[in-house]
């Protein structure tokens, strides 16, 4: 009886241990968030590469994840839409430049359908509220006389990978800049399509070269990227809708081509041409169709 009792006690102990181990494994597997997000560093300076990565727990192999970076003032600084690998992992690299220029805390948000997550990083170098250097004690008179006066020449910054020096600042190269046109990219199939290159050149070389153009793009991006990822996904799923969008973009691309034939050297010229092109697009997309519909109804 004693031997059988010890045997039963051993079996009971092993059962309790195995149940505890299986429970911990089960709990750990259910603690994985639907979508995770992280950056490789906690802070970045001007021109640094920001590596953003994460994991989609229930990836369906079809939809893409949308990554958005928001500046300390709440404005949208950059956006990207990428496809995870077959196992649900995703990663992308953005350069700390362009719209990422204000010193402070940036919020990185990721969304995959109804699932979302976010993280933060610090930007420590660029335009804006730069932290002043601590004051230094004045040197002794005899030491100041012996040492040469420091040179006031400022050396040019060394730009990181994927950036170029422009007007004394490191800016992202054309093919690495974030914030692309998601709807047009999905319509034409590639960021290297001539139409996408044309839109990027108009934005970077014309609109963003003025303060009024930069302000317009900031407000426009807040509105545009609130719905464009959904439309871009639907374009990839529906070829007929994709062709319809491509056809609808043609008048806008034609009107924007006007900016290639004018010289914009002031804020007033940017406002004038910008308002003119906006009114032209309103006429093509809304006024002209309304007039045609009314004439057709009157004939009946």
Image (tube, rainbow, N blue to C red):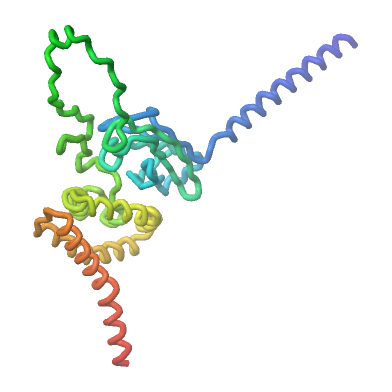
Nearer to me, 190 or 225: 225
Q: Quadrant of the C terminus?
A: bottom left
Nearer to me, 116 or 193: 116
Q: Which residue ends up furthest to the right in the rendered image?
A: 1
In the rendered image, residue 37, in percent from the top left (x then y), is placed at 44, 36
In the rendered image, residue 284, in percent from the top left (x then y), is placed at 24, 72
Residue at (36% x, 53% y) in the render? 222
Number of numbered tags placed on the structure image: 0
Is residue 232 in view from this perspective? no
Nearer to me, 297 or 55: 297
Residue at (24% x, 73% y) in the render? 283
Residue at (22% x, 12% y) in the render? 139
Above or below, 86 relative to 275: above
Nearer to me, 171 or 243: 171
Is residue 61 in view from this perspective? yes
Residue at (41% x, 40% y) in the render? 108
Above or below, 107 relative to 284: above
Q: Which residue ends up furthest to the bottom in the rendered image?
A: 300
């Amino acid at each position: 009886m004693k031997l059988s009792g010890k045997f039963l006690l051993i079996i009971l102990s092993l059962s309790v241990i195995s149940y505890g181990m299986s429970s911990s494994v089960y709990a750990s597997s259910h603690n994985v968030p639907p979508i995770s997000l992280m950056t490789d560093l906690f802070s970045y300076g001007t021109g640094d590469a920001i590596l953003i990565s994460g994991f989609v727990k229930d990836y369906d192999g079809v939809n893409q994840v949308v990554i958005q970076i928001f500046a300390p003032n709440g404005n949208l600084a950059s956006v990207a839409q990428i496809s995870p690998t077959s196992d649900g992992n995703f990663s992308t690299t953005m350069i700390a430049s362009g719209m990422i220029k204000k010193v402070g805390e940036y919020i990185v948000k990721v969304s995959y359908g109804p699932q979302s997550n976010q993280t933060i990083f610090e930007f420590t170098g660029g335009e804006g509220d730069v932290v002043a250097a601590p004051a230094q004690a004045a040197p002794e008179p005899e030491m100041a006389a012996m040492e040469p006066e420091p040179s006031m020449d400022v050396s040019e910054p060394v730009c990181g990978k994927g950036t170029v020096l422009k007007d004394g600042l490191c800016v992202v190269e054309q093919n690495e800049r974030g914030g692309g046109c998601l709807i047009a990219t999905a319509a034409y199939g590639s960021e290297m399509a001539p139409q996408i290159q044309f839109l990027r050149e108009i934005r970077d070389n014309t609109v963003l070269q003025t303060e009024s153009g930069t302000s317009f793009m900031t407000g426009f991006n807040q509105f545009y990227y609130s719905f464009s990822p959904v439309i871009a996904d639907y374009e990839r799923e529906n070829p007929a809708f994709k062709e319809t969008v491509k056809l609808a973009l043609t008048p806008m691309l034609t009107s924007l081509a006007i900016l290639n034939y004018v010289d914009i050297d002031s804020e007033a010229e940017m406002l004038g041409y910008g308002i003119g092109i906006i009114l032209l697009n309103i006429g093509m997309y809304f006024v002209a169709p309304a007039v045609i519909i009314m004439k057709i109804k009157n004939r009946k």
